[in-house]
Image (tube, rainbow, N blue to C red):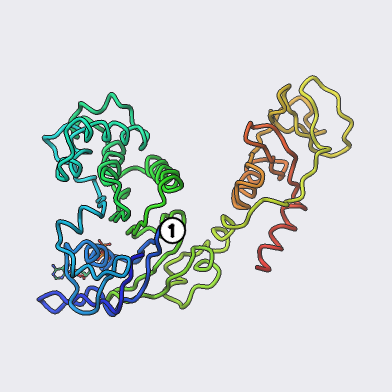
Amino acid sequence: MITFDAVTKRFPDGTVAVDDLTMEAPTGEITVLVGPSGCGKTTSLRMINRMIDASEGQILLDGVPVQSIDPPTLRRGIGYVIQQAGLFPHRKIVDNIATVPYLLGWDRKKARDRAMELLERVGLDPALAGRYPFQLSGGQQQRVGVARALAADPPVLLMDEPFSAVDPVVRTSLQEELLRLQGELNKTIVFVTHDIDEAIKLGDRVAVLRVGGRLAQLAAPKTLLSEPSDDFVREFLGHDRGIRRLQFVSTEGLRLRTDLTVRQDGGGSSEEPWRLVVDEQGGPVGWISWSRPDELEPFGTFLYGRDSMRSALDAALLSPSGCSVAVDDEGKVVGVATREALDEALAEAADG
Ligand SMILES: Nc1ncnc2c1ncn2[C@@H]1O[C@H](COP(=O)(O)OP(=O)(O)OP(=O)(O)O)[C@@H](O)[C@H]1O
């Protein structure tokens, strides 16, 4: 656990970057610091590994003040990932990843074996090991940055806008990769971003800071969306707060109909205006309507019980029938969520 206990940072020119910050980042969880530019996110993060020292108050790592640990020792136990990865340009990828193990005096083979294992773990082709950073895409470099931070298996990971410099598609895949890795590794992660959507997607808890380095609210994403503490937080969360809240509402228990599907080879006796055509394996093929029985219309699917109500609603909006198709892990149709069923679920979600 990382504890900020009444921490203030005042720079020599008088700027107060962080003001009386008290909060905890629990062990094994992702705590996100989010807020507008200049609100003190990076300063807060860097005080944890003593790249910046606090002016007042203290930061504790599992109860031990970081001020009592000398910075090199402290940093060996804390992985650090920054924007644009910050790789050493003249070192091969494998040696970049093995940086901390080398510093710790591991023998070369053990350090390199560990680097190769991590390369795969972060979803990269081992063939990239012998390249130099400039021979990798931005997204690949960012993955190497994560692998390097994990090399000595530190319990704590600090991540400062690590995915900001890549395009939205790569960014999404890096976010998903981080969540997958965290599912296996359970690190204590403090993650800085200015992007509230990223904060909500990644954070077990999200700390919203306001300019002047004051904590506005610290809460689970779901609570943040449903109960913002004041106008500043409400505004920072943006206008489609209600829709975004749906990503925390499960589709488990959503009422499904199983009488609306027909086989591709014809048949089926439904009187409904729309019927869902499925193939031999039970996968969805398209909607047909009585008015245009020869045309397959588009459909949208969601993973039943695993995807959120936001996905179910999105799937419905992608289909002229207005219904969304619930599928299982193998892509087989489990049933159809009609407008009525979605409406019921939305009303329930709105009730809280
Ligand atoms: N070395 C310094 N000397 C004086 N002021 C500083 C110094 N470093 C940062 N600041 C100021 O402290 C405040 C907080 O900076 P910080 O970098 O922590 O913000 P941030 O929330 O990470 O911003 P961004 O999202 O733009 O990166 C800013 O007003 C910044 O100008």
Residues packed near mark 1 inside 10 Å, few (<14), some (14 to 19) or many (20 plus): many
Outermost residue on the top side: it is: 265
Q: Is residue 348 left or right of residue 126?
A: right
Above or below, comparing residue 154 to residue 64 in the picture = above
x and y percent of residue 138 in the render? 27, 38
Quarter-of-image position of residue 207: bottom left
The N terminus - image quarter: bottom left
Residue located at (24% from left, 32% from top): 136
Q: Is residue 336 left or right of residue 174?
A: right
Number of marks drawn? 1
Above or below, comparing residue 11 to residue 69 in the picture = below
Quarter-of-image position of residue 349: bottom right
x and y percent of residue 157 in the render? 31, 54
Residue located at (26% from left, 63% from top): 45
The residue where tag 1 is placed is: 203
Residue located at (65% from left, 47% from top): 305
Q: Is residue 239 left or right of residue 251?
A: left
Kind of residue at badge 1: Gly
Residue located at (17% from left, 77% from top): 55
Q: Nearer the viewer, residue 279 or 103?
A: 103
Secondary structure at numbered mark 1? loop
